[in-house]
């Protein structure tokens, strides 16, 4: 039987390494993850991966390695539905590169269809259709960095076992209630959804 792994991805100090230590039966001690650790049944990644545009890579990794990833938890997925981000006028902070590209290279927007089609190659919503493992999904409804509408595009394209939790008073931030759900989700033999 092929061994599957858990892939932990989240912001710095979210507790990914601590969760890894708990799941592995280790004593808790501080350790700053500097690179993606793949040596055990748990893949632990640096928080900087989710604090930059690389967070979309987590969903892509899950989608492109269905035999390796056992389950996934997603909180405010990034790099999703670029066209909707543009239409909502939410091309700031995390998505500001879209606005800069448009201003510098396509000021009259004649090439807009082409560059949105090209962005589709890295769009998380397009990778979501390939995810096969159970997914625990969280959305802060006040998120102005990754708008909830764009997160819907990812969730709606997941065709696996999934459960979504909405957090009305939260933006793009750590959500303790979601963190608590992670323990049941990752610690049980079967994914609890």
Image (cartoon, rainbow, N blue to C red):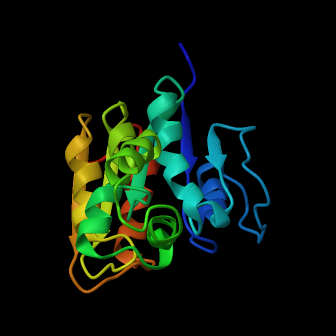
126 and 4: which one is in front?
Answer: 126
Q: In the figure, residue 138 lies in which quadrant?
A: bottom left
Q: In the figure, residue 129 lies in which quadrant?
A: top left
Please state the horizontal and vertical placement of residue 37, each as a whole percent of the image: 74, 46
Please state the horizontal and vertical placement of residue 112, each as a whole percent of the image: 35, 54
Residue plotted at (53% across, 38% down): 61
Image vertical order of residue 29 relative to residue 46, above or below: below
Image vertical order of residue 69 relative to residue 177, above or below: above
Please state the horizontal and vertical placement of residue 141, each as a whole percent of the image: 24, 77
How many numbered tags mark residues here? Answer: 0
57 and 136: which one is in front?
Answer: 57
Residue plotted at (48% across, 79% down): 93
Image vertical order of residue 41 relative to residue 23, above or below: above
Relative horizontal placement of residue 69, taking residue 145 as reference (left or right): right
Relative horizontal placement of residue 55, taking residue 34 as reference (left or right): left
47 and 145: which one is in front?
Answer: 145
Residue plotted at (71% across, 40% down): 38
Please state the horizontal and vertical placement of residue 53, each as a whole percent of the image: 56, 61
Q: Residue furthest bottom?
A: 169
Residue plotted at (40% across, 76% down): 145
Q: In the figure, residue 108 lies in which quadrant?
A: bottom left
Relative horizontal placement of residue 156, taking residue 96 as reference (left or right): left
């Amino acid at each position: 039987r092929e061994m599957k792994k858990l892939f932990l991805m989240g912001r710095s100090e979210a507790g990914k390494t601590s969760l890894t230590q708990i799941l592995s039966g280790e004593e808790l001690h501080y350790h700053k993850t500097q690179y993606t650790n793949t040596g055990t049944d748990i893949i632990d990644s640096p928080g900087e991966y989710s604090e930059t545009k690389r967070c979309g890579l987590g969903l892509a990794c899950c989608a492109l390695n269905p035999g390796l990833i056992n389950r996934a938890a997603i909180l405010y997925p990034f790099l999703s539905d670029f066209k909707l981000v543009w239409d909502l006028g939410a091309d700031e902070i995390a998505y500001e590169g879209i606005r800069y590209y448009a201003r510098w290279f396509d000021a009259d927007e004649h090439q807009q269809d082409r560059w949105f089609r090209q962005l589709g190659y890295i769009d998380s919503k397009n990778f979501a259709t390939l995810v096969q493992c159970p997914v625990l999904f969280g959305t802060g409804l006040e998120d102005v960095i990754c708008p909830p509408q764009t997160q819907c595009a990812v969730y709606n394209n997941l065709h696996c076992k999934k459960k979504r939790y909405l957090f009305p008073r939260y933006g793009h931030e750590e959500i303790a209630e979601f963190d608590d759900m992670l323990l049941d989700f990752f610690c049980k033999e079967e994914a609890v959804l």
